[in-house]
Amino acid sequence: MQNWAGGLRATRGMLGTLAFVAALAAAGWAGFGNGARADNEGLLKEIVIGAGSHDVGVFGRKKESGSDINVELRFQPLEGEFWSWIYSPTPHIGLHYNTSGNTNQVFVGANWLFDIGSGIFGGGSFGFAAHDGETDSGTLGRKDLGLPVLFRESLEIGFKAGNEHSISLMLDHVSNADIHSENEGLDTVSLRYSVGL
């Protein structure tokens, strides 16, 4: 009962933080900090699609099976003096769909990607993921993730061909950062293709 109550408070806190981040993003797109966007530039920057291995066990033990198909929408970088202090992150929303009926995710957050040179880029992201997996059931072959909303981080490296097309390799990790006693975490490695708009 105590774990359940603590988990509920933590989930409410994460959802509150998510709402705050969304409000900041809206402020950034509206031109917060004198960073108004050109009239002919849409909010959506690129579409990313990919596929890869589910629950690869980089930061924990592998339990779930199947492959993941992922889709992500990346928006224009947040502009203005405030956002430039944190290197103008790119907001995103996306999903992981598991082909074997295991844990699926919907995620939101912010990306930081940097040109390394010769078309190579790298970076990462931070945000939150909501999932339909197990939280504390002990089901065989399933991860106990503790909470329905988790922290999500990723690392990505890739190659950009021109201004519109790129391929990349991404590792992402979701967990509750030990807020809940059950925190097996889930790692996915994906090969991805993105097209700019």
Image: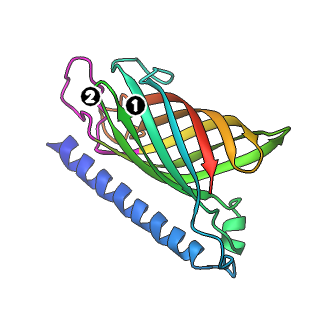
Q: Point out the residue furthest to the left here.
A: 1
Q: Position of residue 195 (x, y in %)?
A: 62, 47
Horizontal side, residue 170 vs residue 16: left or right: right
Amino acid of disc 1: Gly
Query: What is the crowding at mark 1: few (fewer than 14 residues within 10 Å), some, or many (at least 20)?
Result: many
Amino acid of disc 2: Gly
Circle 2 or circle 1, nearest the eye: 2
Say if 42 sits above or below 175 in the image: below
Q: Position of residue 134 (x, y in %)?
A: 24, 33
Residue linked to disc 1: 185
Q: At 45% across and 38% down in the image, what residue appears?
A: 70
Query: What is the crowding at mark 2: few (fewer than 14 residues within 10 Å), some, or many (at least 20)?
Result: few
Q: Is residue 92 in the magenta section?
A: no
Question: Which quarter of the figure is the C terminus placed in?
Answer: bottom right
User: Magenta stretch: dominant SS?
Assistant: loop
Residue linked to disc 2: 101
Question: Which quarter of the figure is the N terminus placed in?
Answer: top left
